[in-house]
Amino acid sequence: MELLVSPSSLEEAKLSLSADIVDVKRPAEGSLGANFPWVIRSIKEITGEKPISAAIGDFAPKPGTAALAAYGAACAGADYVKIGLMFSDAEDARQVIRAVVKAIKPEFPEKTVVIAAYSDYERLLTISPFDMAAIAGEEGADISMIDTGLKDGKSTFEFMDEAALTSFTRENKKLGMKTALAGSLVFEDISPLKRIDPDIIGVRGMVCGGDRSCTIQPELVEKALAMVRS
Ligand SMILES: O=C[C@H](O)COP(=O)(O)O
């Protein structure tokens, strides 16, 4: 299980370099808020061989906009391109996922396409992670992810229990995809997460001291890494 940490700036990225994956986002623009291409590029320049991820947004069903954003993030240096599906319709999801895969894979076959749905989908009235994953698997995405769409401090575990998250992880394996789990995760969630055993866990609030609007604390990144790897 790898640890993904989500800095919002070059300065925060320098505090996150011990993470397995540095994930560039702009929290001010939402759960998977897109950061600027120049920030993505500046972080790529300091991470060396370590892969970086870039969130492109919590998207409405706009496949053209999603494809262009995904391509831009890939050109800016992102090794993983991550999109959130902030809508409900399955056919819309298929069109968005297909467009993002087509925008990236022909020119960047080595880059990774991450499709996220939300554990709090019932309160958001958005597509369920299970429905998303089935489509993402068919459309050639690489990683199926769960995050929380509304960042009110409630952990993903308050919306989907360990059994559901385990089932999601196992379904992804059957679909030939990896799994990433995130969503206001706290240190206490690491133990059940190790039992669930996704490929990646994504955190920000955890390593900011509990409030994602604060700054990443490197000692908390080290603490999370030690717990994940123990
Ligand atoms: O991986 C990305 C997540 O959105 C991390 O942010 P969070 O831990 O504050 O929910």
Image (tube, helix red, strand yellow):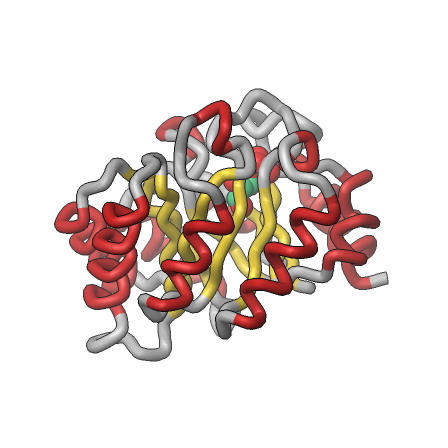
- Judge whether 135 appears above or below 131 on screen: below
Q: Quadrant of the C terminus?
A: bottom right
Q: Which one is in front, 132 or 68?
A: 132
Which residue is located at x 35 percent, y 70 percent? 140
- The picture places residue 123, in percent across and down from the top left corner, at 49, 23
- The picture places residue 121, in percent across and down from the top left corner, at 48, 33
**Where, by quadrant of the figure, is residue 154 drawn?**
top right
- Judge whether 16 appears above or below 171 on screen: above
- Judge whether 174 appears above or below 230 on screen: below
Q: Answer left or right for 140 relative to 103.
A: right
Q: Which residue extends farthest right? A: 230
Q: Which residue extends farthest top? A: 152
Which residue is located at x 48 percent, y 67 percent? 51
**Where, by quadrant of the figure, is residue 153 drawn?**
top right
- The picture places residue 47, in percent across and down from the top left corner, at 49, 63
Q: Answer left or right for 198 relative to 195.
A: left
Which residue is located at x 24 percent, y 52 percent? 96
Residue 213 showing in the rendered view: yes
Q: Quadrant of the N terminus?
A: bottom right
- The picture places residue 36, in percent across and down from the top left corner, at 28, 43
Residue 79 showing in the rendered view: no
Q: Quadrant of ligand 1?
A: top right
